[in-house]
């Protein structure tokens, strides 16, 4: 199944992003207009007297099922896109834009808090028992001054979380977005399947860790150490390749010097041969060992060069 990243339209920011937050129970996902009804996250009643609800608006890299006609696929938002959407929502003054089940616009519901989770373990959402809150999640608190919504929907448990409404573009529709022309459709589909399986796996792991009051950040030091070690290995490999390349060049120079020596020997022997062939034969018998030694050295150097080139390939 295809997985699509949704983005802020950078060339049309005024009409892109989240336009309203809806209080919802459950439901299907609409088509072009993003009304993510099945992506609601349960909210907590922070203060019953002040009528404040808290919940996640969007969670990064969380697959969201959608269906448009016969086409079924997943969409997701990156942490960077979520951060931009949260900022645009406030900058555009949409704090009082709210709907019920993505159908009915309702008044007297106002966003009073908005933040991006930096440390899930230290985030105040933990205090209210909200689970599945990852780093980069857009959290919000909403004040409900609407008596009908509070008494007949919130208190009755008919609405369970927040959902968004807004306009985004697919990554495939992004202006000037590079496309891997050299990849076949099967390769692209396979990569997309791997992406979604990875996201689902990470989300499942996060849920399991949350039961033990842990999250994936617990393993962050391990990842950081591995990344640091891999970076050091890469630098050493680069230095190794550079050093070996220098040795190969030195050996090539030595080989050329041996070839020059052989050529000089042959040239001088030819000049003696023109004067006295017998003397040339005697000299060749006496000094032929030097020529053979040079030829043997060239073969040894060629073998060393081949071995060093194999080492360079292993360091790539």
Image (cartoon, rainbow, N blue to C red):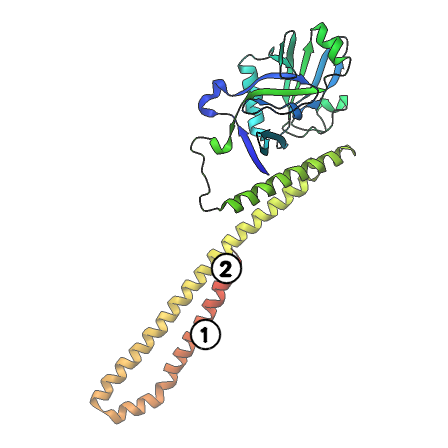
Q: Residue at x 24, y 87 (%)?
A: 272
Count of numbered circles on the image: 2
Give the image quarter of residue 295: bottom left
Closer to viewer: mark 2 or mark 1: 2
Q: SS for tag 2?
A: helix
On the image, the x and y values in percent for residue 228 come to 60, 45
Image disc number at residue 313: 2
Q: Residue at x 63, y 46 (%)?
A: 226
Indicate left or right for 23 with 234 as reference. Answer: right
Indicate left or right for 170 with 274 as reference. Answer: right
The disc, 2 or 1, on the residue closer to the chain's N-terminal end is 1
| Residue behind mark 1 | 300
Distance from disc 2 to disc 1, alpha carbons, whole Å, reads: 20 Å
Indicate left or right for 129 with 270 as reference. Answer: right
On the image, the x and y values in percent for residue 92 come to 53, 14
Q: Nearer the viewer, residue 295 or 152?
A: 152
Placement of 126 over or under 142, stated as above or below:
below
Q: Residue at x 54, y 53 (%)?
A: 236
Placement of 241 over or under 301, stated as above or below:
above
Q: Nearer the viewer, residue 280 or 207?
A: 207
Q: SS for tag 1?
A: helix
- Quarter holding the N terminus is top right
């Amino acid at each position: 199944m295809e997985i699509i990243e949704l983005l802020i339209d950078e060339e049309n920011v005024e009409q892109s992003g989240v336009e309203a937050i809806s209080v919802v129970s459950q439901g299907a996902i609409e088509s072009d207009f993003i009304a993510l009804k099945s992506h609601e996250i349960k909210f907590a009643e922070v203060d019953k007297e002040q009528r404040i609800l808290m919940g996640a608006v969007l969670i990064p890299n969380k697959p969201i099922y959608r269906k448009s006609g016969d086409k079924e696929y997943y969409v997701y938002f990156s942490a960077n896109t979520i951060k931009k959407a949260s900022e645009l929502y406030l900058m555009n003054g949409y704090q009082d834009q709210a709907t019920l089940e993505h159908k009915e616009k309702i008044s007297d519901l106002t966003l009073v808090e908005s933040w991006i989770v930096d440390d899930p373990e230290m985030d105040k959402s933990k205090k209210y028992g909200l689970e599945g809150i990852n780093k980069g999640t857009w959290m919000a608190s909403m004040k409900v001054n609407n008596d009908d919504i509070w008494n007949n929907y919130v208190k009755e448990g008919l609405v369970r979380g927040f959902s968004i409404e807004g306009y985004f573009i697919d990554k495939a529709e992004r202006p000037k977005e590079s496309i891997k022309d050299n990849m076949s459709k099967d390769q692209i589909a396979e990569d997309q399947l791997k992406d979604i399986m990875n996201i689902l796996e990470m989300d499942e792991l996060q849920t399991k860790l949350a039961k033990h009051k842990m999250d994936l950040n617990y393993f962050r030091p391990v990842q950081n150490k591995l990344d640091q070690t891999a970076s050091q290995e890469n630098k050493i490999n680069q230095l190794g390749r550079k050093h070996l390349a220098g040795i190969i060049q030195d050996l090539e120079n030595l080989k050329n010097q041996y070839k020059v020596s052989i050529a000089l020997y042959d040239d001088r022997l030819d000049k003696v041969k023109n004067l006295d062939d017998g003397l040339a034969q005697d000299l060749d018998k006496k000094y032929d060992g030097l020529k053979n030694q040079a030829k043997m050295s060239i073969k040894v150097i060629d073998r060393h060069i081949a071995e060093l080139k194999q080492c360079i390939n292993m360091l790539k």
